[in-house]
Amino acid sequence: MAEVRISTHSSESTREQLEQYAEAHGMKKGYVVEQALLHHLQALRELPAEIVIPPRITVSRRSLEKVTGFLKKPRAPTKALRDLLAGEPVDDQR
């Protein structure tokens, strides 16, 4: 099979992680990248789109503030959550 060169830009941290992984496992970086790309493309083909979680999630300022608010002042757990964590069946499983 003929090989082609793919050029891309990535963050410094991604490059460092790639180098560390390749060195730790005795692999060439190109091989790791190709396997990762093939794995990702296969997942995109075979899995429903809603369960493929992107490695980075971008949120709006408003969403970030909302999440931060929940972290600073969490709501009390619901009875269903308390039952679930206690190992008890939830309403729709009774």
Image (tube, grey):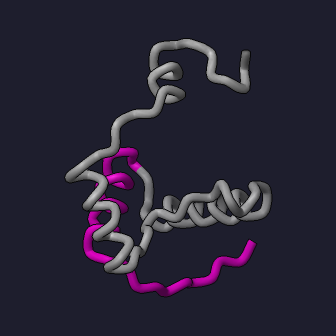
Q: Give the range drawn in magenta.
A: 1-26
Q: In this view, does 83 lie to the left or right of 71?
A: right
- Identify which residue is drawn at 23% across, 50% down: 73
Residue 19 inside the magenta-drawn segment: yes
Q: Is residue 38 left or right of residue 48?
A: left
- Identify which residue is drawn at 78% across, 63% down: 45
- How many marks the image carries: the answer is 0
Closest to the observer: 46 or 78?
Answer: 78
Q: Position of residue 88 (x, y in %)?
A: 56, 13
Q: In this view, does 49 lie to the left or right of 17?
A: right
Residue 88 inside the magenta-drawn segment: no
Query: For residue 51, what is the image quadrant?
Result: bottom right
Q: Where is residue 49 in the image (x, y as percent from the top left)?
A: 71, 63
Query: For residue 2, what is the image quadrant?
Result: bottom right
Closest to the observer: 55 or 21?
Answer: 55
User: Which quadrant: the N terminus?
Assistant: bottom right
- Identify which residue is drawn at 38% across, 72% down: 63
Q: Where 51 sits versus 37, above or below?
A: above
Whether residue 15 is visible, yes or no, is no
